[in-house]
Image (cartoon, rainbow, N blue to C red):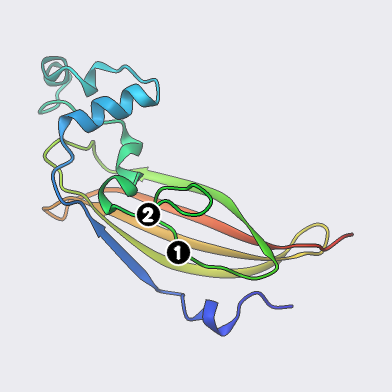
Amino acid sequence: MSLITDEVRALLGTTKVYTAPEELGGAAGRYFGLAIGDNNPLYSDPEYARSQGLQGVTAPLTLVCETNQYANLPIAADGYAGHVWEIEIPGTRKVRGGNWYTFHRRIRPEDVITATWEITDLAEKKTSTGADMLVVTSAATYTNQHGEELAENKETIIFVQSGVAK
């Protein structure tokens, strides 16, 4: 059974772009730091941040990858609030395969972020029990209003055929 149908194959190269409606702002970094339990004064104390060679406060690096904060996307049926490809393959279950990040520079409160996502690869594989899998790889580039690259995010989503026993 092939999970890469013509409809899925047509998604290869599909791009979605999300641009924030405003600057990130200093409060976002401070609140995100608090939410993840990181009380680093780089996120809340401008004087301390300047003493560390920054122009002012910054944000935890992964905040830039939380696309829903500026894309205003609806919450998905599974409760996920963020970018999704809305790929549904009957007879499979969806598993997040992981993310790999590269950060180019710290995020500043004045940054207006744009996330550009693209489906970069589709691969069929088999599980150890013989079930078909489709691995969808996508990549995002995060830039600011000046076109400066802030971060990259490579993500895999895996669709595993249901009901296959060894």
Q: Amino acid at mark 2?
A: Pro
Residue at 11% across / 53% down in the picture?
A: 146
The kind of secondary structure element at disc 1 is: loop
- First of labels 2, 1 by sequence position: 2
The location of residue 23, given as percent across then percent down, is: 13, 43
The residue at which mark 1 appears reads as: 85
The location of residue 125, given as percent across then percent down, is: 69, 66
Residue in the foreground of this view, choosing between 44 and 75: 75
The kind of secondary structure element at disc 2 is: loop
Q: Amino acid at mark 1?
A: Trp
Residue at 35% across / 50% down in the picture?
A: 152
- Image position of 143 (left or right of 94): left
User: In this rendering, is residue 111 above or below 130?
Assistant: above
Label disc, if present, on residue 74 of the rendered structure: 2
Tell me which corner region of the image, top left, top right, bottom left or bottom right, holds residue 161.
bottom right
- Mark 2–mark 1 contact, CB under 8 Å? no
